[in-house]
Structure formats: structure tokens, C-alpha cells
Image (tube, rainbow, N blue to C red):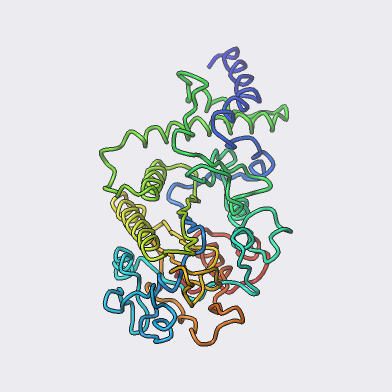
Amino acid sequence: MNTNRRRFLQSSLGASTLLSASATVPHLLARTAAAASKKGATKKSGENILVVVQLSGGNDGLNTVVPYADPIYEKNRIALRIDRASVVKLDDEVGLHPNLKPLAKLAEQGRLAVVQGVGYPNPDRSHFSSMDVWHTAERKPELQRDGWLGRAVEHTTRAAGAAAPALHLGGGPLPLALSSRTVAIPSVESLDGFKLTGRRGVDLAALREVAEAERPDGGEMLAFLQRTTLGAYESSERVQAALGLEADAATYPGHRLAQKLKNIARLIDADLETTIYYVSLDGFDTHANQRQSHANLMTELAESVAAFLTDLTERGHVDRTTVLMFSEFGRRVKENASAGTDHGAAAPLFVAGGGLRKAGIVGKHPSLEDLDREGDLKFHTDFRSVYAAILEGRLGAASRDVLGGDYVPTPLFG
């Protein structure tokens, strides 16, 4: 490359290009300099992936993981109880909602763990406050305005110009769990949000040569901007290439969650630098007429996740992928007068995918007789112990650094 062309590309790959790119890819490039400038190594293809599925509204754990053998369950769920003959039994005491059969098959394959009795001390039954607790991993979330996954990214990201170390897919505000003080994490409605349209016919080889060139004059910030811009263009190219591989895609149901997970599978296959993906499934605040709406949600969750893991198996990524499915709290043991359930406390969560040491039931079902003073299930597994297991067993991060405390990891991986 001649000197004049190099000088032109160096200047055009600077701050003005960075701002142009960030206008097209929301939140993608703007605030990453402070964190990424400290990272030197290159990210390796094949790193573990975490996919978080947030079940928003407070999932009814008792009708998800059903204590079918307990007469107290039947006594408190006259209109809503799941008949024991239709429960998908996991052992002699509990089983899954009948619409969760696809998840039960994953458990049989060693791909699903059902962690029971998950919660935290002095539970908050407000949707917003409790979700903030889960997002920040702090009992007083107002004192911690970044999230556990945002902090995890800061401790695990190694690519100096990573355009998207984590990603929220589905639109809306960035979940607090992904908030970081030093790393920019994008929230996009669809994969079209990754398409850079500001420049045509970009010569990536030339940009790469400039971005990787030595700068004895101390231009570290300019070099960072150039590498970050290059990373954005390269990520955009990989995403657009993945979008063109429709013939390779597995069969997914038409659920909205399934389509989000389908796109995530394609992104994983595109070999991006993204290691954390976040999506939501709404509708779990079932105060009235719960039976059918909850059954529909169970169908969407199970069919979507099962299709996703089947797709990842065919693409060769299932062993390095973990799916965490959680809700901000469970619901009351006793149904209400509107054939629904009100806000509760402890509940089960699901961990699916590769690397599980123990599939099926993890921990005992909370007692339906020994309830807290609000009439809710008592927790025995702190959700941060599950986080610690994922951080240390799958993401390679020291859980104490991310969670700000010592939590014994739930025995999930090994």
C-alpha cells in the first residue's frame, strides 16, 4: 500500500468513521475505549456461549415444576392444578407441566437441569424491584447500577475492538443485567440492526492493514478507534453472511421466542465475538384466568428452546452453549379467586445445553407446608450460586469479582 493511501485510510478510519458507524448500529461502538484498551489478547473461536431467556412477569413455578404427589398442592390449586396423570414425571414427587415435554426430553438426553427452590433472602414481590435484584445480583440494586452480565463481560472480553461482546435481541431498553460502566453492549430489534449502510464497497483488507499497523507516534486512541470500526464492519459482514444461509437453518416453530433463538443460532454460527445473548418472553403475570395463558407460555418456551438446541447440535455448537431460563419470582401456593395466582417468592429455574454434570432435578422441592409469613415457598438456593456456577464453569470468570461476594456454585457443571 502506498504512503498516501495509508495516510488517507488512517484518517478516514478515525473518530468520524466511528461516529458514522455507531449511528447505524445502536450503542455498538460509543463507550468501549476505556475497557477494551486494557485488553490485549485475541478472542478464540469456540468459546463458551451463554443465552439468557428472561421469563418476565413472575412465572408460576408450582405449575411449571409440579409437586404432583403432594396433597397440599391439590388442596391449594382447585381450579389450576395439573392432573397428576398428565404431569411429565421427573421422579416420584415432581414433574413438568404437560406442555414442557420437549424440555423433559432434553433432561433425558442430559441437556437440562431443573434447579428447585431458587430465590434470595427477604424477597421483594415487586416486579421491578425483584427483577433489578436478579439483574444486579445485589439485594439493594439501587446502589448498583450495572448488571452481573455487564460485569462478566468486563472480566471475560479479550478482543480490543469487539463490536458486540454481548447482545440483547428483541428491541426495547437494554436490560439492566447487561449494563456496564465501561463496555458498550447493543440492544437491537432484529439482525438488520447490525447492517452498516453508511459506506459501500469497503476494502476490509486495506482497513485491516491500517488498523494493525504500528504507531510509534503514540496514537493509541486513534488505533483503538480504527480497530473498533474495523470490528464493526467485520461483524456486519459475518451477520449478513449468516442471514444468507437460510437453507442450513433448522426447523423452528412460529413463536416469537423461537425466531429470536433462531437468529441467535445463526449469529453463533457466524463466529462473532459475542459470548452472551439475552432475550425475553413476556406474559407471566397471571393474576386471572391463568390456566390457558400459562399453558401457552409453557408451549412457546419448551418448543423454542428444544428447536434451538437441536439447531445448535446440527451446527456443532451445543456443547459450548448454556441456556439460562429464569423469572423474577414465583407465585403464591394458593390460587386466588380469579383463577389465577399472585406474586410469590421462591421458584425453579432451568439450565439447558452442554457441559452439565447433573441433568434433571437439582435440589429438593420447597416444602408446601412450611411457608413464609406471606404464604410463599421458602428458597434454599440463592440465585447467585447459580450465577457463580455459570461464571466459573462456563464463562471462565471469577464469580467473586463479578458478584461481589462468595457464593458456592450450584453443582451444575463439571
Q: Residue at x 35, y 70 (%)?
A: 97
Percent across and percent down for residue 185 are 58, 43
183 left or right, relative to 365: right
Vertical placement of 211 versus 99: above or below? above
Residue 20 in sight in this render: yes
Percent across and percent down for residue 406 are 65, 71
For this rendering, which residue is in front, 76 or 9? 76
Q: Residue at x 55, y 63 (%)?
A: 328
Instruction: Determine the image quadrant of residue 226.
Output: top right
Disc tally is 0
Q: Residue at x 35, y 65 (%)?
A: 111
Instruction: Determine the image quadrant of residue 66.
Output: bottom left
115 left or right, relative to 10: left
Percent across and percent down for residue 123 are 62, 71
For this rendering, which residue is in front, 230 or 4? 230
23 left or right, relative to 275: right
Vertical placement of 55 versus 81: above or below? above
Percent across and percent down for residue 240 are 40, 32
Residue found at the very far top of the displayed protein:
4
